[in-house]
Image: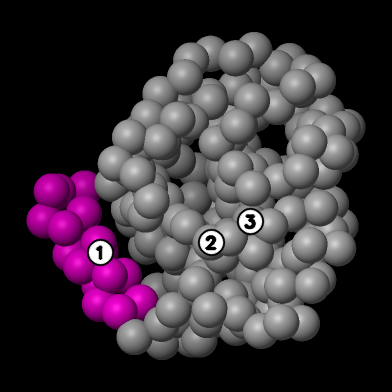
């Protein structure tokens, strides 16, 4: 993979998302998100941050999940850029999910390994995951505890978990804390875990 491939895929994703806005969602979406223990506040990991997280993986041939995938940038970029078997995004907002599906359609067969689910992340099995990014910054403590229980029950030892918050009760080693570029901050904290 050459540096120009990375630049080209980044430019393609940035261009495709240029006309979409994940910050504005319907009141129905806001109420659904609040009722499920999260916040409708929106932000996204930037593509440079995605590359930094993925560089921490031992291999790129597994299954990547983005739990709280928003408009799907991480999933679609990862699908284009890396040889994952599957890249899966789970997003509760119907409006954001719709954007992800529209951009996926624009990309066509080049992202056939990308999948999106418009659902609560607690409802989607993640048993085949080799890496998970949990966009947990706006999760309530009680919802994050439910996420920890789900991951403890479903993930295999060695699965990598990246989270924007500490996940209390996660049966994993906290390998390190790092920072990545997010839409709201150039150096936002990310916790790197390896499941026991």
Q: Quadrant of the C terminus?
A: top right
- Residue 172 shown left or right of residue 83 in the figure: right
Residue that protrudes farthest toward the left in the picture: 4
Residue 98, x across and y down, in percent: 60, 83
Residue at the disc numbered 2: 42
Start-end of magenta stretch: 1-18
Does residue 167 appear in this view?
A: yes
Residue beneath the point at 20% across and 68% down: 11
Cβ atoms under marks 3 and 1 closer than 8 Å? no
Residue 171, x across and y down, in percent: 78, 18
Is residue 16 shown in magenta?
yes
Categorize mark 2 by other alpha carbons within 10 Å: few (<14), some (14-19), many (20+). some
- Residue 129 shown left or right of residue 151 in the figure: left
Residue at the disc numbered 3: 68
Q: Tell me the CA gap for discs 2 and 3.
A: 10 Å
Eyeballing the image, is 170 above or below 43? above
Residue 32, x across and y down, in percent: 81, 71
Residue beneath the point at 59% across and 52% down: 66
Predominant SS of the magenta segment: helix
Specify how the rendered protein is coloured. one colour
- Residue 159 shown left or right of residue 168 in the figure: left
Q: Secondary structure at mark 1?
A: helix
Q: Secondary structure at mark 2?
A: loop
Residue 134, x across and y down, in percent: 62, 43
Categorize mark 1 by other alpha carbons within 10 Å: few (<14), some (14-19), many (20+). some
- Residue 30 shown left or right of residue 23 in the figure: right
Please identify, in this view, whether the residue under mark 2 or under mark 3 is nearer the observer.
Answer: 2
Residue beneath the point at 82% across and 43% down: 143
Is residue 82 shown in magenta?
no
Residue at the disc numbered 1: 9
């Amino acid at each position: 993979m050459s540096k120009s491939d990375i630049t080209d895929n980044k430019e393609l994703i940035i261009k495709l998302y240029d006309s979409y806005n994940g910050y504005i969602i319907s009141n129905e979406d806001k109420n659904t998100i609040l009722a499920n223990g999260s916040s409708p506040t929106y932000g996204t990991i930037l593509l440079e941050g995605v590359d930094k997280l993925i560089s921490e993986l031992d291999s790129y041939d597994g299954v990547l999940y983005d739990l709280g995938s928003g408009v799907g940038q991480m999933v679609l970029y990862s699908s284009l850029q890396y040889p994952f078997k599957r890249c899966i995004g789970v997003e509760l907002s119907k409006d954001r999910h719709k954007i992800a599906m529209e951009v996926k359609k624009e990309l066509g067969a080049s992202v056939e390994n990308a999948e999106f689910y418009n659902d609560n992340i607690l409802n989607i099995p993640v048993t085949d995951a080799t890496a998970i990014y949990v966009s947990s910054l706006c999760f309530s403590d009680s919802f994050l505890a439910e996420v920890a229980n789900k991951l403890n029950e479903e993930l295999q030892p060695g699965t990598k978990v990246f989270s924007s918050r500490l996940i209390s009760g996660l049966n994993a080693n906290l390998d390190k804390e790092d920072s990545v570029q997010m839409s709201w901050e150039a150096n936002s904290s990310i916790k790197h875990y390896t499941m026991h």
